Amino acid sequence: MSLPLEGLTAIVTGAGRGLGRTEALELARLGAAVVVNDYGQPGRDGSGAASATPAEEVAAEIRAAGGRALAHTGDVADREQARALVDLAIGEFGKLDIVVNNAGILRDRMVFSMSEDEWDSVIRVHLKGHFNTTHFASAHWRARAKAADGSVYGRIVNTSSEAFLAGSAGQPNYAAAKGGIVGLTTSTALALAKYGVTANVICPRARTRMTEDVFHGFEVPEQGLDPLAPEHVAPLVGYLASPAAAHVNGQLLVVHGGMVAVVERPRVAAKFDAKQDAFTYDELDALLGPYYAERPRGETFAAAEVLGLKHL
């Protein structure tokens, strides 16, 4: 019996550890040839010397299990290194079919204390890194589709975070980058649909080195699979990368611990019309003042409540 991703080639960025590693292993288990990308810096803030070891170890693990894999140790936030990553997949395996963008770093600081470099570096790795691989992969798919006078097989799975939905006081750079990734994904989904390519985005909850502070107090259970284990996220990525998900496009899904939640696009909660051609200050105050006075202040909640962590 054939595997769902047999004959397909995938790139997984940030795949040397954590979520990316489990996603690369899952795609390989489902039959894909995998290019394992990881820049290999040991610090979750992107600090430390780059190392080929994380990517090479995961690629070796896939090959040892009977799969096909090779390592790429470039920085996907660098345009030319991202181009080289896509070219490597195509050159080694003949074509590219799946891109899973996962690479990221953290440089947390309150907005009033954040430096320009702390802002720029996080936006660069997360948002520009997602764009770079998407750009070169989509150009490949578009050219193939035009040459075949039809459509091709293409899947993009991007990684956002509930930090962009719920807010995260000490992560203005991270929350902004993750919000940008959602916008990038929905735009890409619309642009590439006619070529047979889908683009979706996930908000995973998983215990990794990047989230060790977020999940403080939610310890690994003594028995059974940790609800925050990255292994809970990987099956959804495998599904979205598969032919079975051809009808799933431009979607945002939250995933963790045996749960997948489909997030709707924002909806209008209330609407007010001016009595004249334009609003006056007093009219706005008379309309919006009572409206917000009757609602929770700013409708903001503790992060744990929004993320549902108290139910884990």
Image (cartoon, helix red, strand yellow):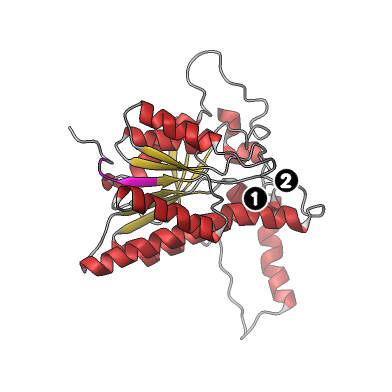
Above or below, comparing residue 248 to residue 239 in the picture? below
Residue type indicated by callout 2: Asp
Q: Quadrant of residue 121?
A: bottom right
Q: Which residue is mark 1?
A: 174
Question: Predominant secondary structure in magenta?
Answer: loop
| Residue 251 can be seen in this image | no
Q: Quadrant of residue 108?
A: top right
Residue type indicated by callout 1: Tyr
Q: Is residue 118 magenta?
A: no
- Position of residue 256 measured from the top left corner of the image (x, y, whole percent): 49, 34
**Which circle's residue, 1 or 2, is located before the other in the chain?**
2
Q: Residue furthest bottom?
A: 277
Q: Residue at x 67, y 25 (%)?
A: 217
Query: Do the residues bearing badges 1 and 2 touch, measured as CB atoms within 8 Å?
Result: yes
The stretch of residues the image draws in magenta is 6-10
Q: Residue at x 62, y 56 (%)?
A: 124
Q: Residue at x 65, y 52 (%)?
A: 122
Q: Residues within 10 Å of mark 2 (few under 14, many from 20)?
A: some
| Residue 84 can be seen in this image | yes
Give the left or right position of residue 197, taking residue 78 as reference. Answer: left
Q: How far is the residue under mark 1 from the one under mark 2?
A: 8 Å
- Position of residue 21 measured from the top left corner of the image (x, y, whole percent): 48, 35
Q: Is residue 9 magenta?
A: yes
Q: Which residue is mark 2?
A: 108
- Position of residue 229 measured from the top left corner of the image (x, y, whole percent): 51, 28
- Position of residue 245 measured from the top left corner of the image (x, y, whole percent): 30, 47
**Position of the C terminus by quadrant:** top right
Q: Nearer the viewer, residue 307 or 38?
A: 38
